[in-house]
Image: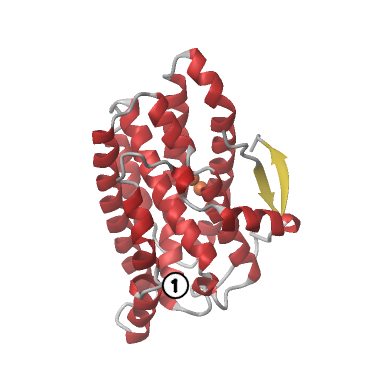
Amino acid sequence: MANLIVRRLLIDLATPFPARWNGGDAFRSAFFNALSMSFPVGEQYFIDSVRAGLKALPPELQEGLAREVQGFVGQEATHRRVHALFNGHLTALGFDNELERRSTRRIQKNAGSDVRIHVAATAATEHLTAIFADWLLRHPEAMEGAEPRMRILWQWHASEESEHCSTAFDVYRALGGNEEWRMRLFGYITTTFALDITRQTIRNLWHDRSLFKWSTWRSAYRLLFSPQGMIRASYPAWKAYKAADFHPRQQDGSLARAWLQNNTDQYVPLGQQA
Ligand SMILES: [Fe+2]
Ligand SMILES: [Fe+2]
């Protein structure tokens, strides 16, 4: 069982930042902003799903997972708060978070589904965030030229995503969730998440007046589709989820552990409560 600690970041989140905060690069900024826009509503959904999943377990199984779920909830609640502050600056710059409205509608529409569906959807999204996290920690050039406080924010979030990558998955297994639905939800989540982020990135670029510039799409290629780019380099880790004997702990979390150990001056550990 993972011992998940909630950490309060010490960085300045009050000072505004420019639209192209990520090294002056329009695409890198718009893409990261789209991810950030998905977090507050998404992470609340993960919290609600994993909590409901834990509650649905028989007491003897609850006992083994309760502490880890508490840490998971504390970490995700902290991420929500930090990204809500981050997104507040984007709103002040005139960016419209359409992704949040769409996800909220989708969550409301599916609210009556079986708890295992919600936990499977959470486990699938957590795998996507964990592989993105690992890629980000492996490729600091994705935030080249960004202010240190921005790099710390994203690397801290990435490290905690890697740290708690197995919580929802273990709750799903404990609930007796089957392989068929684990795979179905993984396909569904990959598609909807990719579409949501693509649409919001385009929206952000439109607002930034950089949608139709060659430099924007050159940067998109470098960030996502080049051999070391996020999508190509992460494909083997994405595919690993489909193996029958997959478990999130099989993924390499060493960079995340190293980041948390090497950056203790950037946060205050709060224990398990957010
Ligand atoms: Fe998170
Ligand atoms: Fe997470």
Answer with left or right where residue 82 lies relative to residue 230.
right
Estimate the x, y position of residue 147 in percent, counting from the top left. Answer: 62, 72
Left-right relation of 7 to 235:
right
Residue 95 spot, x, y in % from top left: 42, 64
* Residue drawn at the location 29% of the way across and 30% of the way down: 178
Looking at the image, residue 208 lies above or below residue 116: below
Q: Which residue is mark 1?
A: 28
Q: Nearer the viewer, residue 212 or 140?
A: 140
User: Quick one: SS at disc 1?
Assistant: helix
Image check: 108 left or right of 71?
Answer: left
- Residue at image location 47% in from the left, 28% down from the top: 51
| Quadrant assignment, res 270 | top right
Q: Nearer the viewer, residue 61 or 90?
A: 61
For this orientation, the residue located farthest to the front is: 245
At x 42%, y 69%, the residue is: 30
Farthest residue to the top: give it. Answer: 59
Where 74 falls versus 262 (above or below)? above
For label 1, count other residues whose C-alpha is less than 10 Å away and answer few (under 14), some (14-19) or many (20+).
many
In the image, residue 3 lies at what x, y percent? 62, 36
Residue name at image x 64 percent, y 38 percent: 274
Relative to 78, 205 lies left or right: left
Q: Nearer the viewer, residue 240 or 108?
A: 240
Q: Quadrant of the N terminus?
A: top right
Q: How is the image coloured?
A: secondary structure
Picture coordinates of residue 97 (x, y %)? 39, 57
Q: Is mark 1 within 8 Å of ligand 1?
A: no
Is residue 209 among what the camera can see? Answer: no
How many labels sit on residues?
Answer: 1
Name the residue at the bottom extreme: 214
Q: Looking at numbered disc 1 in the image, what kind of residue is underneath it?
A: Arg
